[in-house]
Amino acid sequence: MPHRTHGTGRFEPAQLASLGEGCVLEEGVLVFHPENVHLGRGVYVGHQTILKGYYQNTLRIGDGTWIGQQCFFHAGGGLTIGARVGIGPCVRILTSTHREAGRDTPILFSPIDFAPVVIEDDADLGVGSIVLPGVTIGRGAQIGAGAVVTADVPAYSVAAGVPARVLRMRP
């Protein structure tokens, strides 16, 4: 089965679905399907981050959110990041996974399932954390460095580990 290019990811700010005042997009940021990417006011996107929009669904980032360097966000299933969210360098957020199709089908060619990810306002994702499809991270929740988030995280909780587990509630 031949593969095809997804393009370079190079974009002009005017191609974004919406771009709030005061946004900073550092050198090397790539945006795919910019027509489905919405950035609120005062969003910072660090060097070499990839915003992988998709031909369906949207990627929305709320006002005042800070995104570190070398992050990868996939929005095929829909991705909503709230306002004032802190996202450390090298964070990965995924919204699709390959379905199990049996041993006779290579995983690469098995059907793809999509599920939205929601990161609510005021949350914080530690460096190198990974958020898997279908997860909601509640308002003000804190995710530890290197955590792999496979299930919803309640508002104002602290979660860490692989897989991530709630350790405590924030005061």
Image: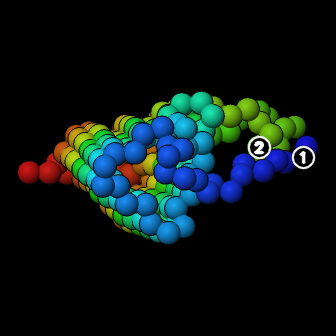
Which residue is at the front of the view, 10 or 32? 10
Q: Quadrant of the N terminus?
A: top right
In this view, the mark in front (2 or 1): 1
Other-residue count near label 2 (Cα within 10 Å), few / some / many at <14 / 14–19 / ≥20: some
**Residue at (76, 43) in percent of width and height:** 107
Can residue 151 be seen by looking at this rendering? no
Q: Secondary structure at mark 2?
A: helix
Q: Depth check: give the residue in front, 71 or 36.
A: 36
Residue assigned mark 1: 2
Most extreme residue toward the left is 171
- How much space separates mark 2 and mark 1, taking CA atoms? 16 Å
12, 146: nearer the viewer: 12
Q: How many marks?
A: 2
Q: Quick one: SS at disc 1?
A: loop
Earlier residue among tags 2 and 1:
1
Name the spot of residue 118 as percent of width and height, x first: 38, 37
Residue 170 as seen in the image, left or right of residue 43: left
Q: Amino acid at mark 2?
A: Ile
- Name, please, the residue furthest toward the front: 14
The residue drawn where x is 52% and y is 36% is 36
Which residue has dot 2 on it? 107
Checking the image for residue 171, the label placed there is: none
Above/below status of 62 relative to 112:
below
Residue 56 x, y percent position in the rendering: 59, 30
Q: Residue at x 31, y 49 (%)?
A: 21
| Residues packed near mark 1 inside 10 Å, few (<14), some (14 to 19) or many (20 plus) | few
Please state which amino acid type lies under the numbered disc 1: Pro
Mark 2 in CB contact with mark 1 (< 8 angstroms)? no
Image check: 64 left or right of 73?
A: left
Q: Residue at image x 60%, y 42%? A: 33
